[in-house]
Image: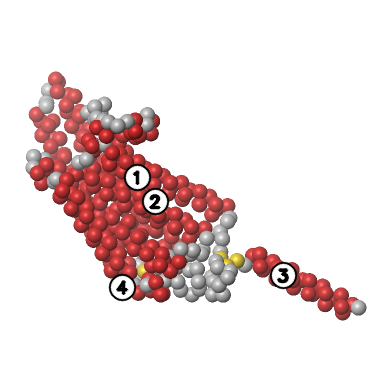
Amino acid sequence: MIGSVLTDRLASEMNNTAYEQNITVQYCFPSINSSCRKEVRTGPAYIFLFIVLSCVSVFTVFLNLLLIISISHFKQLHTPTNLLILSLAVADLLVGLFIMPVNIMMLIDSCWYLGKIMCSIYPIFNGVSMSGSIYSLILIAVDRFIAVTDPLLYSTRVTICKTVLSIILGWSFSLLYAFIFVYFNDHLLPSQALTGCYGECVIYVKYSWLVVNVALFFLAPCSVILVLYSVIFTVARRQAKAIRAVTKGLSNKHEAQVSRFSEAKAAKTLGIVIFVHLACWVPYSLSVEKITSLSVVWTVFAWIIYMNSSMNPLIYAIFYPWFRASVKYIITSCRIFVPSSSRFNLFQEHF
């Protein structure tokens, strides 16, 4: 009798243990035997992180989408410089619309639900978006360099057609590099994308390609931007001194103050551009070991770089008066739906 009771009690405890394991242990795809274990991170810290990163993603999409609508809709903004800003906004929009949400999903849930093909395509999409943003920054720097150093011939040297061609070439190079990256990292092929178990997508970055990425996406762009903006700043200071020399006297103090303000503004813009770019890419450039997408280092460095897509529209658009005017027309008064709204003068109140 006692043995029977003990047996029944032991069986009950085993059933309870099995039941608890079924609750706590989850799988990405329960119907597949080779499925990975599912790790859902639902602690307070992860919930807070999820909310913050989601807000960053929404902010990135909203601000870049607003910038794209402004430049595309208002004919007055159809200039070579604004086309480059539009290219930058498109690249940053892709980061906020696709790259950030996927990374948020992987951060909260360890499973990959998008399949083998998407596991292979995602690195390409990621690379194209990030490199498109970086090379748009370079094109903007080149455009401003020509405008400052050769203002009289700027309109002939920089045209809409040439700008569009340079944008196409930049995006083509980004796409080509992404395919080369996938080709030489053969573990990203569809047949080998999911490693270990079903429901896992791991991206391995070899040390050699880490060095190449640092050279192409940090050292080279940063060097070009530093040199160009240094020349721009030097020319701006020289022009400001010339203006001050001409406008000496009590009757021209206002013009001298304007020139000093322009010089300070140029210095401030240079500092913001360089600081944000360095702050976002320096941590990635300092990583000297082979890393994977599952590592904490990869996650932290990736999100620091993604933040650059949130800051770019702030640096290159919000400080422009025409952007504030276009936002007023689009959001505040909803006058963008007026048939003749594309021909509104966005500069009448600011210049």
**Dot placed on the residue nearer the N-terminal end, 3 or 1:** 3
Q: Is residue 39 toward the left or the right of residue 208 in the image?
A: right
**Dot placed on the residue nearer the N-terminal end, 3 or 4:** 3
Q: Where does the image place residue 199, in percent across and percent down from the top left? A: 50, 68
Q: Is the C-beta separation of discs 1 and 2 under 8 Å?
A: yes
**Dot placed on the residue nearer the N-terminal end, 1 or 2:** 1
Q: Nearer the viewer, residue 105 or 334?
A: 334
Q: Is residue 260 toward the left or the right of residue 278 in the image?
A: left
Residue 96: assigned label:
2
Query: Amino acid under label 2?
Result: Gly
Q: Where does the image place residue 147, in percent across and percent down from the top left? A: 14, 42
Residue at which label 4 appears: 184
Look at 41% across and 44% down and name the residue there. 59
**Circle 4 SS class:** helix
Residue at which label 1 appears: 64
Look at 91% across and 78% down and name the residue there. 1
Q: 217 above or below 8? A: above
Q: Where does the image place residue 140, in percent across and percent down from the top left? A: 22, 48
Rounded to the nearest whole Å, what is the CA distance between mark 1 and mark 4? 33 Å
Query: Amino acid under label 1?
Result: Asn
